[in-house]
Amino acid sequence: MGSVSKLRTVELTVRYGDKIGVADVSLEIPERQVLALIGPSGCGKSTFLRALNRMNDGAIGVEVAGRVELDGVDVYGGDVDPVLVRRRVGMVFQRPNPFPKSIYENVAYGLRIGGRQKRSVLNERVEHALGRAGLWDEVKDRLHTSGTDLSGGQQQRLCLARALAVEPEVILMDEPASALDPIATERLESLIKELGRSLTVVIVTHNLGQARRVSERTAFFYLGKLIEVAATSELFEHPQQRKTQAYLTGGFG
Amino acid sequence: MSAEVSLLPVSSDPPHRRRSFGEPLARLVFTFAALLVLLSTLMVLGFLAQRGLIGLWAIGPAELLLGADWRPELGRFGGRPLLFGTAVSAALALLLGGAPAVLAAIYSVELAPAPARRAMERLMALAAAVPSVVYGWLALVHLVPAAAQVGGVLYGDGAPGGEGLAVSGVLLGLMIGPTVFLLSASAFAKVPKDLREASLALGASPLHGALYVVFPAAWRGVVGALLLGFARAAGETMAVQMVIGGARQLPLHLFTPTTTIATQLVADMQNARPGTLASDALYAMALVLLVFSALLVVFTRRLLLGGQK
């Protein structure tokens, strides 16, 4: 704790048409830690997450107010290219979504965006990314088979490898284990903890046990508002707000 | 409460649950309709194949497909100019109309704002419904004179009227464009949104994702759209008849009059008394066109279904 903020939101508000998805959220996200976002369905945690790397940019009727600072620079600033923001802030989605390409090409996809790469460099970075995602040993002999033929858990780790390949500084995860079985979930969780040592991870989860296991800090959202944020053990054992208490004891959600 | 439960209708059931004349009658009507469709199709195919095969046998496939001289009144049935005209005008249509339509569909589905996309799709649906005679007429009035000028510049006096494959290709391109657009747009739209998001999240621009994720995922649908466009262009008759010039010869270049299978069928029909070789030759040519289109459809099917394991 007490480390520098990698990301920080200042009075962030996201509206869809006349509905408010995220209301006035100011949150510090420290570097090289895992931050879990919890809260009932529709509480705005996913919307908040997607606002961090401007994933909602193209969507019609979505309006963002306030600031999201990445290393002190507002990613919604007038001269900021959202494409470059997303290169630094990667994302893993709820459902595994590998491209219908080979395992190798899935991981190389992000690396090829910048232009041609030397094959040897590409090979090395693909292997490295698959290794970090804990998938290398399982797929090294079939890199050129389709990524969609893998099991669900492997697919999700492939998506993680794909995101890691472009060496992002932050990884956003939107309920990454919700479509996985318990064993695959466990593997993914240990990877997330591992990744938290070298980069900044923000994970949205419905699974309170998961938040507890993987994160250093936890933020509780309710009705678009940030209710409480604290060190994970602190928040789970001594919640300060009545709403947090109620949620943690299964009062709603 | 009685424990008797029966699946047979009882008098307290509402009347529509009971058996009536309605259901068997409806079955009969539907079955008859299905048989009618089947039978009429088989009859068309049967007649065509019967006369066509007689013609093919009498003329010989080599002469019918490769011979250069088509003059039924002299007993010459060389189909090469017809096949050539059909193939080249349809290929030009793919190049001038099909390919741009695919690119426009990418733009519309992947890059354009939603209202622009909807407007384009409506416009294309409308364009696809315009009768071919209208296209032909507009081409005759506007494209042929323009082609005469272009041909004049390129070939001097060699291109007097402007009719020929150039105009036919442009016209057919205009005609198949909307269909190819709509079919490929629907192929692109079927690609899951997840994949686009994954691409964006890796720092790819929407265009990059369109070219390297969406297009490869939808290519079967796109090829299918192009093949159907090609088949339609190869079979188009009325509109092409108005602008191709109707000369039974291999063209010197794209601005000289020539002919296609479909237009030549129309032109020769009046002079071909049933039962004569001239008539059977037309059936044979029609059979060639049918087989050619059917092969395309089968190939398309294979390709489209090949991806689904």
Image (cartoon, rainbow, N blue to C red):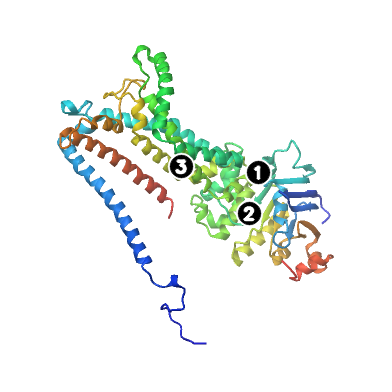
Foreground residue, A1 or B261?
B261
Residue A119 badge: none
Identify the residue shown where x is 56% and y is 39%.
Answer: B119
Numbered circle sitting on residue A58: 1
Q: Amino acid at mark 2?
A: Phe
Q: CA distance from mark 1 to mark 2?
A: 17 Å
State the separation of the CA atoms marked 2 and 3.
Answer: 28 Å
The answer to whether the residues at label 2 and label 3 have Cβ atoms under 8 Å apart is: no
Rendering quarter of residue B227: top left
Disc 1/disc 3 C-alpha distance (Å): 25 Å
Label disc, if present, on residue B222 of the rendered structure? 3
Tag 2 or tag 1, which sits nearer the N-term? 1
Q: Height in image: A138 above or below B178?
A: below
Residue A128 visible, this angle? no
Q: Secondary structure at mark 1?
A: loop
Task: Write down the chain letter for disc 1.
Answer: A
Image quarter hosting the C terminus of chain B: bottom left
B277 versus A75 height, above or below: above
- Residue topped by disc 2: A93
Q: Is residue B217 above or below residue A138?
A: above
| Type of amino acid under label 1 | Gly
Q: Of the residues tagged 2 and 3, which is closer to the observer?
A: 3
Considering only vertical position in the picture, is B157 above or below A228? above
In the rendered structure, which amino acid carries the disc numbered 3? Answer: Val
Apparent side of residue B288 relative to residue B275 in the rendered image (left or right): right
> How busy is the neighbourhood of tag 2: few (under 14 within 10 Å), some, or many (20 plus)?
many
From the viewer's perspective, tell me whether residue B119 is left or right of residue A12.
left
